[in-house]
Image (spheres, helix red, strand yellow):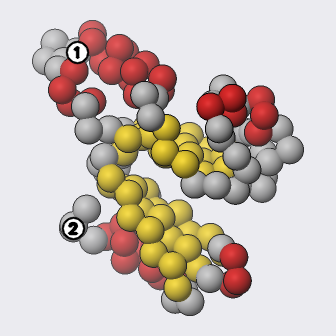
Amino acid sequence: MTENAVALAYDGTDGQRVVVRFVGVMSVLLGAPNDETLNAHPLYSRGLQPYEFAEVENSPWIAALEKANRVHPHHSPGLFADLRHFILPFHDSTFECVARSVEVSVGSDDSLATAARMIDSDTP
């Protein structure tokens, strides 16, 4: 993780390594709920499912970030226009990220080395 990018590496189906890189990161959350309590997540009623990578349209989190930023003397709502809200519900936790872009790599490469290369990459 850097101030502008986050990469997650995990084992996917069929033993494949999955690396997900988020660029232009505004905010990150990791923790509850787990897969057994995902129905308590505020976005569950909008279709959030365990183990499914999702993007939230009309994100209330992005709206809240924009609203909170209004106290900044140079605030511009346009700075939030291209932000995207992603969710990855895992077995023991849920990862959420507001970022400008995402890329996913799947393969048999060492996931930690791939994640390190992706974080250090200069290209989004």
Visible in this render: residue 82?
yes
Q: Residue furthest right?
A: 36
Q: Residue at x 43, y 28 (%)?
A: 58
Label annotation for residue 72:
1
Please report whichever mark, 1 or 2, sits nearer to the chain's N-terminal start. 1
Q: In this rendering, does residue 28 appear at all?
A: no
Q: CA distance from mark 1 to mark 2?
A: 28 Å
**Could you tell me if the residues under marks 1 and 2 are in contact, i.e. CB atoms within 8 Å?**
no
Q: Which residue is mark 2?
A: 122
Q: Is residue 74 left or right of residue 29?
A: left
Q: Residue furthest left?
A: 74
Residue 63 is situated, as x and y percent measured from the top left of the image, at 39, 21
Element type at mark 1: loop
Q: Quadrant of the N terminus?
A: bottom left
As drawn, 69 above or below 85: above
Going 73% across and 50% down the picture, which residue do you hit?
A: 50
The disc labelled 2 sits on which kind of residue?
A: Asp
> Which quadrant of the structure image shows residue 42?
top right
Q: Indicate the quadrant containing the C terminus: top left, top right, bottom left or bottom right.
A: bottom left
Give the number of callouts: 2
Please report the residue visible at 70 percent of the width from the left and 56 percent of the height from the top. 51
The quadrant in which residue 74 appears is: top left
The image shows residue 90 at horizontal and vertical percentages of 71, 55
Q: Nearer the viewer, residue 20 or 118?
A: 20
Residue type indicated by callout 1: His
In this view, the residue farthest toward the bottom is: 108
Query: Crowding near pointer 2: few (<14 within 10 Å), some, many (20+)?
Result: few
Quarter of the view holding residue 48: top right
Instruction: Specify whether 75 is left or right of 12.
Output: left
Q: What SS does tag 2 mark? A: loop
Give the x, y percent position of residue 19: 50, 71
Above or below: residue 120 compared with residue 85: below
